[in-house]
Image (cartoon, rainbow, N blue to C red):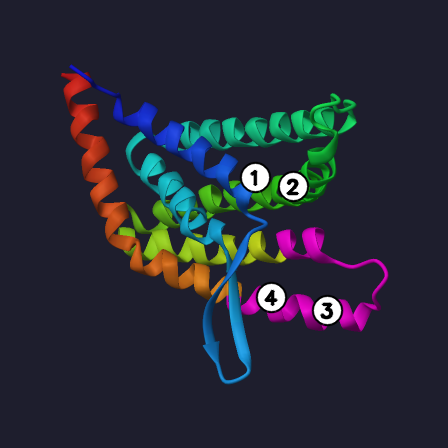
């Protein structure tokens, strides 16, 4: 019978989400247009809130140490990915690949900067999410999971969005005011969008906790 341990699945999905966000997160698409204003989003928007949700589910069932271990696994994945991207860019192309090398370098060269920005933002925000969720849990006990989940996620995703946008899109050739104006136009709507995604995914936290606890009971028994 094809069977996967639930915790193994969560870790695998967590790593999958990180890799997809790193390699494909540079692709943006128009999400909504209001008058002359168009809100664009990275395709990573579909995955990033889920990664924070996984943090909270794991803390609720297995504790802070287990959640931190998963985040460290994610950080190592980003580091390895960045190193391999740099290696691939440094190696000379074969004669058959010369024509495609410029496009390859363009795509993955951008991914390298994105990976560095994401590594920093990911480390700060994910560990902050775990810390906040655990602290609120200490104060409130096991009540109001929805509040603990959304409070920690919304604060952490603001840090994640701000740090990532600054490191990934700050233009050295532009002035300070120009950069601040442009980045604010990216950070605020994108953070609000991720916060909204976090709120509507709240039922997944309850489902995930029950789903994971059922397996934990079987293992313990």
Identify the secondary structure beneath mark 4.
helix
- Which of the two residues, 26 or 151, is positioned nearer the viewer here? 26
Identify the secondary structure beneath mark 1.
helix
- Which of the two residues, 131 or 91, is positioned nearer the viewer here? 91
> What is the quadrant of residue 220 in the picture?
top left
Quadrant of the snapshot with the N terminus:
top left
Identify the residue shown where x is 70% and y is 27%: 97
- Main secondary structure along the magenta-highlighted residues: helix
Of the residues under marks 1 and 4, which one precedes in the sequence?
1
Q: Position of residue 208 (x, y in %)?
A: 25, 40
Residue located beneath label 2 in the image:
111
Quadrant of the snapshot with the C terminus:
top left
CB within 8 Å, label 1 to label 2: yes
Of the residues under marks 4 and 3, which one precedes in the sequence?
3
Of the residues under marks 1 and 2, which one precedes in the sequence?
1
Which one is closest to the eye, mark 1 or mark 4?
Answer: 1
Q: Position of residue 87 (x, y in %)?
A: 72, 24
Of the residues under marks 3 and 1, which one precedes in the sequence?
1
Residue located beneath label 1 in the image:
23
Magenta-drawn segment: 163-189
- Which of the two residues, 146 or 118, is positioned nearer the viewer here? 118
Q: Is residue 78 left or right of residue 51?
A: right
Residue located beneath label 3 in the image:
180
Residue 162, compared with residue 37, is above or below; it is above
């Amino acid at each position: 019978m094809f069977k996967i341990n639930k915790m193994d699945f969560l870790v695998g999905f967590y790593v999958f989400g990180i890799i997809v966000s790193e390699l494909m997160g540079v692709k943006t698409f128009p999400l909504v247009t209001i008058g002359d204003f168009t809100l664009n989003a990275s395709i990573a928007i579909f995955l990033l809130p889920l990664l924070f949700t996984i943090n909270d589910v794991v803390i609720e069932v297995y504790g802070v140490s287990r959640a931190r271990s998963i985040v460290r696994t994610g950080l190592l994945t980003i580091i390895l990915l960045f190193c391999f991207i740099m290696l691939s860019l440094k190696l000379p192309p074969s004669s058959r690949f010369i024509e495609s090398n410029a496009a390859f370098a363009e795509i993955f060269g951008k991914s390298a900067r994105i990976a560095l920005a994401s590594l920093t933002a990911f480390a700060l925000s994910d560990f902050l999410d775990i810390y906040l969720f655990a602290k609120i849990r200490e104060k409130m006990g096991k009540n109001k999971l929805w509040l603990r989940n959304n409070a920690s996620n919304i604060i952490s995703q603001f840090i994640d969005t701000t740090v990532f946008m600054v490191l990934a899109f700050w233009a050295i050739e532009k002035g300070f005011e120009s950069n601040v104006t442009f980045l604010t136009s990216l950070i605020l709507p994108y953070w609000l969008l991720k916060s909204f995604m976090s709120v509507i995914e709240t039922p997944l936290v309850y489902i995930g906790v029950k789903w994971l606890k059922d397996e934990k009971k079987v293992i313990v028994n």
